[in-house]
Image: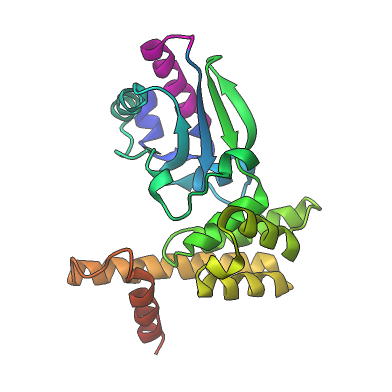
Amino acid sequence: MFANERNGKITKDNVDFYLKEFSKVFKKLNGSKMPAEIILIGGASVLVNYNFRNSTGDIDAIIKSSSVVKEAIQIIKDRYNLPNDWLNTDFEKSPLYSPKLREISRHYKTLSKILEIRTVDAEYLVAMKLMAGRLYKHDLSDIVGIFWEQQKNNKPLKKENIENAVNYLYGSMNNLPKDSVIFIENVLACNNIENMFYQIVYDENNAKNILDNFTADYPNVINKDNINNILKKLIENDNV
């Protein structure tokens, strides 16, 4: 019943629950002498730190633990009908990864006295989202949402915060996609960040619908290297 109620979705309300269940299984499989560490990245880190977003497709994470971690992930997947990659351990293969992420992460909580959960703060989340810069995901709305909530909490992000974070993780602002550099300049100059957030959410949903329709008609055309360029052209045509 509990699994059906959760319906296989990862939300702000249940992300801690799934991580707690994972920690219990991991401890049972691995014993209590070998601790483990998970650094929440991306959408999951947004969920535990902010209120503007309610769900994520998976939990991107950097995981430091023993080999039984994959077995524990599979057990929780089957138990609660989660996606195959509900706890995505491939993040270190992503261009968003930086070996410095461990250094800038901070403690979130410890589960089952064996699993430490760590998270990433605002400017570093923004830096990673800028490096991704996908039009059809939550990257851009997450950036604006973070700026919005930081502003509401009287902890506004400034240009130097973002530049320092990008430089630390990725070497230089010049290493970001050009569109992301333009985007963050627009965010920093925006006078109504709340309106910008809702507009970006609308644009992302529209972009995903356009992309889904295109891939249904033309399968095997889009790949990770051409997806943003193709999508931009499709959006331009859709607005004509």
Viewer-proximal residue, 201 or 229?
Answer: 229
User: Residue drawn 35% across and 26% down?
Assistant: 76
Say which quarter of the image contains residue 26.
top left
Viewer-proximal residue, 104 or 211?
Answer: 104
Q: Say if 238 sits above or below 170 in the image.
A: below
Q: Say if the magenta span includes residue 32.
A: yes
* Res. 14 in view: no
Viewer-proximal residue, 138 or 166?
Answer: 166
Say whether residue 186 is left or right of residue 229. Answer: right
Q: Which residues are magenta?
A: 16-33
Q: Main secondary structure of the magenta part?
A: helix
Spot occupied by residue 147 in the image (x, y as percentages of width and height): 68, 59
Q: Say if the magenta span includes residue 185.
A: no
Q: Say if 230 sits above or below 106 in the image.
A: below
User: Residue drawn 56% across and 29% down?
Assistant: 117
* Res. 232 in view: yes
Spot occupied by residue 148 in the image (x, y as percentages of width and height): 69, 59
Q: Say if 96 sits above or below 211 in the image.
A: above
Say which quarter of the image contains residue 181.
bottom right
Spot occupied by residue 183 in the image (x, y as percentages of width and height): 58, 72
Looking at the image, what colour scheme do you see?
rainbow
Count of marks, rendered view: 0
Say whether residue 162 is left or right of residue 209. Answer: right
